[in-house]
Image (cartoon, helix red, strand yellow):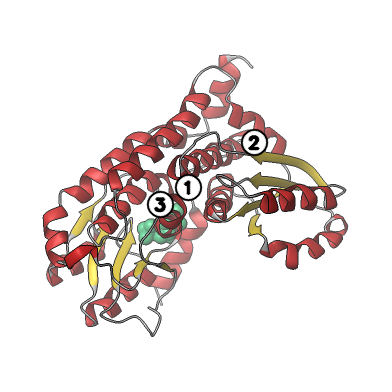
Amino acid sequence: MTTSTLDSLTAHDTADMLGAIATLPSQLADGLARARVLREELTAAWPAEGGATPRTLVVCGMGGSGVGSDLLPAAADVAAPIVAVKGYDLPGWVSDEDRVICVSYSGLTAETLSCFRQAIQKSIVHAVITTGGELAELARAEGVPVVELPGGMQPRAAVGVIFAALTGVAETLNVVADADHVVRDAIAGATLVVEENTAGDEPAALGFARQLHDHVVVIYGSGQTEAIAHRWKAQVNENGKVPCFANAYPELDHNEIVGWEYARATGAKWALVELLPFAASDAIRARFDITRRLISDVVGTDLRFEPSSTTRAGAAFEQLVWGDYVSVYLALVRGIDPSPVERIQSLKGELAGR
Ligand code: PA5
């Protein structure tokens, strides 16, 4: 492909989503630095002797802001369960044995604000992570530390800075032992894929997007890559603006595998993306192989991503960044702009007007 062909595709990327993906390595460093600014304050708020952790770390956030809560246990060894809350209410069992972090890029998301208010009633908010908005105002009024995110991005494009800020805050609760280490590994994994897709006129991700174009894409992960599969799905939805579904082994072999029997009759073209986990066990690898064979009669395109990184955080970000690039090129091969998410904005507007 010539440079001018690539240029004519990327001309649709008016807000430079491709450029934002290329900043992920530097975002990761920046996010940790932003959490570290508050390290003393946050450590003072959790003066646990001997490295004690809260019973659970509850992370509230929606969409692009919620992805950090899934990624953290996928990319790092965590010393307490991470409970992702993606809704209006904290679980009833949450008490002063737990700690809550609220993440909203805009600081305006209704569900996250609702959880913040509930957590403040229980005096268990450890920090908020946001660019501003009502969430920052409420937090400051309550004396809750605010990790400030850089503005001007789509929330989903800020995944590096959000993840690293969350990792840094989790370290102050002893939930992550060494945030520097995790973020360094994540940077290495992200960098591999950024370099592979920014050198030359034929980015590999564009080739993958061409293969997935015009298909309903199903993403399968397992263990660590369950969270990455859901990130891919959300990116294909929001950037590519096409239906996409995600699931994980081994559970999908106990239900979804049967549903494929009807796939051909839907008339859709189906594509499978397989995200092999870091250090996959023989049992899990066998499930990927056998299931792929069993559904091969209906799957038109099959792409398998196996990480080359040798660390958990590196592998997580390596596979995540592939999904970010492929999803953006999926939009560009259709001649549409990956950045706007008009349906999300109009839905939020309609709900706010009620
Ligand atoms: O990518 C998006 O725009 C959405 O998924 C948002 O992240 C989601 O609607 C939540 O908004 P915010 O990230 O501002 O809290």
Instruction: Work out whether mark 3 precedes mark 2 in sequence or the reverse, and give the earlier one.
Output: 3
Placement of 122 over or under 110, stated as above or below: below
Placement of 317 over or under 136, stated as above or below: above
Say which residue appears at 15% left-offset and 60% top-offset: 43
Badge 3 amino acid: Ala
* Residue 227 left/right relative to 155: right
Instruction: Work out whether mark 1 precedes mark 2 in sequence or the reverse, and give the earlier one.
Output: 2
Badge 2 amino acid: Ala
Number of numbered discs: 3
Residue closest to the eye, 332 or 19 = 19
Mark number, residue 340 = 1
Mark number, residue 44 = none
Badge 1 amino acid: Pro
Instruction: Let me know if residue 210 appears in the view.
Output: yes
- Asked which secondary structure carries label 2, the reply is helix
Residue closest to the eye, 163 or 282 = 282
Residue named by callout 2: 209
* Residue 278 left/right relative to 92: right
Residue closest to the eye, 348 or 239 = 239
- Residue 261, given in percent of the width and then of the height, sits at 86, 61
Quadrant in which the C terminus appears: bottom left
Please name which of the two marks, 3 or 1, marks the residue nearer to the observer: 3
Mark number, residue 76 = 3
Distance between the Cα atoms at labels 3 and 2? 29 Å
